[in-house]
Amino acid sequence: MKDQFDLVFDKKDIKVIYQPGIEEFASDLGGKIQSIQRVSRVEWEIGGWTVRSSYDGEMALRTGLRQIHPESRTYMTEFRTVLAPVGPLVYFKTREEALEKEVEFFEQLRLLVPGGSHGNKEG
């Protein structure tokens, strides 16, 4: 079992990113896991590991552009990872790298789960 779990307390639920040992952890506290909702998939695709929403396969971690306008009159473009339905997919060399980025985007991915944001899809 893991030494540490990150828990999010909602009005009536405790939410946690699934990881091996969570059932034993809940049992040790005198509880049990009521339900599991998969919010994303980390899978191998040609090119590397990708992260996609489980509920909308087009929503994936992709490369996005952001225009930066500093105080000067020059514009700069910055590449960054975004959760979006279009754009070049972000490919990770290892599954572990993809899983780390999946955790970083967990809350945005959770909003795509039916009922994941209590009807509010704004993020």
Image: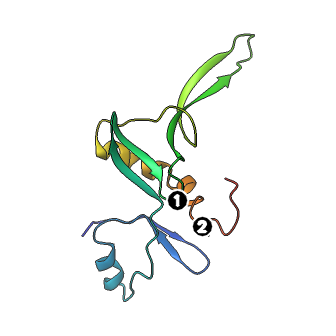
Left or right of 122: which side holds 65?
A: left
Residue 25 image position (x, y, % from top left): 32, 77
Q: Secondary structure at mark 2?
A: loop
Q: CA distance from mark 2 to mark 1?
A: 8 Å
Task: Identify the coloring.
Answer: rainbow
Q: Residue furthest top?
A: 73
Q: Which residue is mark 2?
A: 114
For the point 68% across and 58% down, the residue is 121
Above or below — where is 9 with respect to 88? below
Q: Which mark is residue 92?
A: none
State which quadrant residue 122 falls in: bottom right
Q: Secondary structure at mark 1?
A: loop
Left or right of 52: which side holds 30?
A: left
Q: Amino acid at mark 2?
A: Pro
Asked whether 121 or 77 is in front, the reply is 121
Residue 41 image position (x, y, % from top left): 41, 54
Of callouts 2 and 1, the N-terminal one: 1
Residue 22 image position (x, y, % from top left): 33, 73
Above or below — where is 89 with respect to 73? below
Query: Mark 1 and mark 2 in contact (Cβ < 8 Å)?
Result: yes
For the point 68% across and 15% down, the residue is 75
Q: Amino acid at mark 1?
A: Tyr
Left or right of 45: which side holds 40?
A: right
Look at the image and tell me in which quarter the N terminus lies: bottom left
Q: Which mark is residue 55?
A: 1
